[in-house]
Image: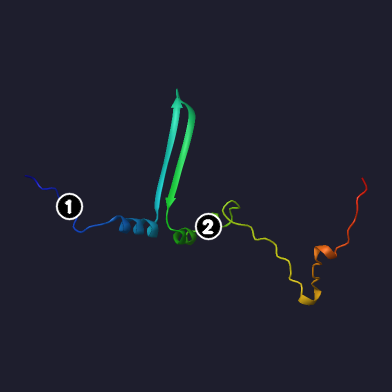
Amino acid sequence: MERVPTVAGTTNLVDILDRVLDKGLVIAGDVRISLANVELLTIRIRLLVCSVDKAEQIGLNWWKFDPHLTMPVPPTRPALPKAARVPARPRSARPQTRRKA
């Protein structure tokens, strides 16, 4: 029986994922569909897989400025001091107005 050479040591999924996220992985390719030398469709694929830290290190941080991924900061009103606050009157103490029919 013939033996197949194997790599010494074991590598699990966590080690592979850690290495890919640390170093990064780039997949690039083009798909072109032509008929009689007339290009009908071109699909360009560029895929980068890396960690957020690595992406920021190489200058990719588009998610920080995407309005669909970030929540806008609501404008804040300055708080009034306690002396300037007017307490709300109870409903029974408010003047009643009558409508004419």
Q: Distance between the residues labelled 1 and 2?
A: 41 Å
Residue reaching furthest top?
A: 36
Quadrant of the rendered structure where residue 87 is?
Answer: bottom right
Q: Please give the residue where the numbered disc 1 appears in the rendered image.
A: 6
User: Which residue is painted at 70% across and 65% down in the image?
Assistant: 76
Q: Position of residue 53 (x, y in %)?
A: 46, 62
Q: Where is residue 81 in the image (x, y as percent from the top left)?
A: 76, 75
Q: Please give the residue where the numbered disc 2 appears in the rendered image.
A: 61
Residue 26 disc label: none
Q: Is disc 2 placed on a helix, strand or loop?
A: loop
- In this view, 59 is above or below 34: below
Q: Is residue 21 left or right of residue 97?
A: left
Towards the viewer: 15 or 34: 15
- In this view, 52 is above or below 47: below
Q: Position of residue 61 (x, y in %)?
A: 53, 57
- Quadrant holding the N terminus: top left
Quadrant of the rendered structure where residue 96 is?
Answer: bottom right
Residue reaching furthest right?
A: 100
Residue reaching furthest bottom?
A: 83
- Quadrant holding the C terminus: top right
User: Which residue is painted at 30% across and 55% down in the image?
Assistant: 13
- In this view, 52 is above or below 88: above
Query: Which amino acid, by three-letter code, is at mark 1?
Result: Thr
Q: Is residue 45 left or right of residue 78?
A: left
Q: Is residue 36 left or right of residue 72?
A: left
Residue reaching furthest left?
A: 1
Q: Is disc 1 placed on a helix, strand or loop?
A: loop
Look at the numbered discs 1 and 2 and tell me whether their residues touch, using CB distance below 8 Å: no
Query: Which amino acid, by three-letter code, is at mark 2?
Result: Asn
Q: Residues within 10 Å of mark 2 (few under 14, many from 20)?
A: few
Towards the viewer: 86 or 24: 86
Q: Position of residue 37 (x, y in %)?
A: 45, 25
